[in-house]
Amino acid sequence: KVCLRFAPEPNGYLHIGHSALLNKYFVDKYNGRLIVRLDDTNPSKESTEFVDSLLKDIASLGIVYDAVTYTSDYFPQLMDMAEKLIHEGKAYVDDTPVDQMRIERDKGVESKCRNNSVSMNLELWKEMILGSDRGLMCCLRGKLDFQNPNKCLRDPVYYRCNLAHHHRVGFKYKLYPTYDFASSFVDALEGITHVLRSNEYRDRDDQCHMIQEDMGVRKVDGWDDPRLPTIQGMVRRGLKIEALTQFIREQGASTNQNLMQWDKLWTINKKIIDPVCPRHTAVLEEHRVLITLANGPAEPFVRVMPRHKKFKEAGEKCTLYTKNIWIDYADALSISANDEVTLMDWGNCIIKEIKRDEMGTVVQLLGVLHLEGSVKATKLKLTWLPETDELVKLQLVDFDSLITKEKLVKFKKKKGEKTQEEKIQEEKEFLKALNPVTRKDTFTLGDSNMRNLKSGEIIQLERK
């Protein structure tokens, strides 16, 4: 569900260049949520007067929002997160003078403080919290990439000291998070899906993603994440309730504890959906290769065919036949000159020539249709798409298991509670079993019929 935020800093009056109405437009269009967040992280420039003025201006614009929040609402969590990053070696305290730091960042020079020990960083962090003379000389920086071409990634500042009075929390804090650090955390916490910002923030997108990765936020979308064994998560992944019912039934009723195999459930599910689910075609967008058919159709033509050859209730789809067609790069690599291959739902063709660039990469195949050839005699059966502007952009998401082991070590209670040592050992075993990469996103092009798909439909991408 679309969730946007309008996050002005309460340091002035709202002008017409702000994105307030644009946020409202997209929220209305997609029936989403809008959060007004007052980004009050710089007490030197902010006041209650500006907060009241902003809320009045938003009301004058006729903007209806779901909630008003303040970045200061999250100050305790932001402090905890900063300290967590210090402990993990992902942030460090730097006392380099401001002008020198600016020059070093511009030239991509590593700060002398970058490799300080965790204990030293924590000691200086406490001085910052106190707002002491020593602390006032320091700032907290993220340990990202001090030589990155995108200068926003060159160890940005996360916290600075500021002894000014804050319009909401008074003098409770002596240090405040920067916009970059605070917004990365709060956007994730509030479930923001899209952020509308002016071009000056464009280079900060990569910075935000890297900070969020270090924070460990947004790794899982929610309890309906398709990697989790919740009903909504599994339904999003394509589970038919009929399969779940059959799976549970096969376990039987017993007082014995039963270790249920995850793969078995999906095998049952596949048997249910495979006979009825419509077929479509997709080609990986990156490095896709064009086949030019010398005797291909001079004018494109369309054929109507079933979406599932053995289940007519799946409906029909239109396939466009053109002289130039796209195939996956991996398929192009497996073809040699003069090979005869089958183009699925069309017939055979003979590849006469393979064109490569100066690096040896296959960039184009030249062939001729040989429709009288035997489909049974060919080894390669290729999925393909016509060269047309009507193809649909797709984002395919592959999910892997969250846990790499079938069964985790679990210590049985002897008498009373588990010992601290047993709890620590259990946690170590659990952490070792976590799969570091459980999601892979691939960008592809799909056949034009996919424009008509509805949310919740189950389809099969042939050969994928």
Image (tube, rainbow, N blue to C red):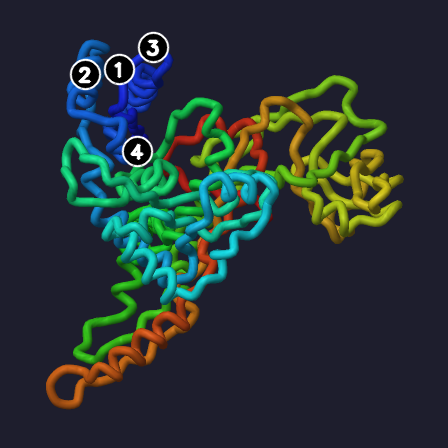
The quarter of the picture where the N terminus appears is top left
Q: Nearer the viewer, residue 268 or 196?
A: 196
Q: What element carries label 2?
A: helix
122 lies left or right of 300: left
Q: Where is mark 4, residue-wise?
A: 1
Give the percent coordinates (x, y) of residue 47. 19, 25
Q: How far apart are marks 1 and 4 (CA)?
A: 31 Å
In the image, which is nearer the foreground, mark 1 or mark 4? 1
Identity of the amino acid at label 4?
Lys
Direction from residue 49 to residue 361 in the image, left or right: right
Residue at disc 3, secondary structure:
loop
Q: Can residue 362 be seen in this view?
A: yes
Please name whichever residue, 304 or 227, is drawn nearer the observer in this view of the structure.
227
Say above or below: 309 vs 430.
above
Q: Which mark is residue 16?
A: 3
Q: 292 above or below 190? A: above
Q: Where is residue 7 in the image (x, y as percent from the top left)?
A: 29, 27
Mark 1 vs mark 2, CA separation in Å: 7 Å
Check disc 4: other Cα within 10 Å, few if <14, some if 14-19, many if 20+: few
Whichever of callouts 1 and 4 sits on the residue coming sooner in the sequence is 4
Amino acid type, callout 2: Ser
Q: Give the distance between the C-alpha atoms of the residues marked 2 and 4, in whole angstroms.
A: 30 Å
Q: Which amino acid does label 1 sit on?
A: Tyr
- Find residue 13 and name its label: 1
For the question of whether residue 443 can be seen, the reply is no
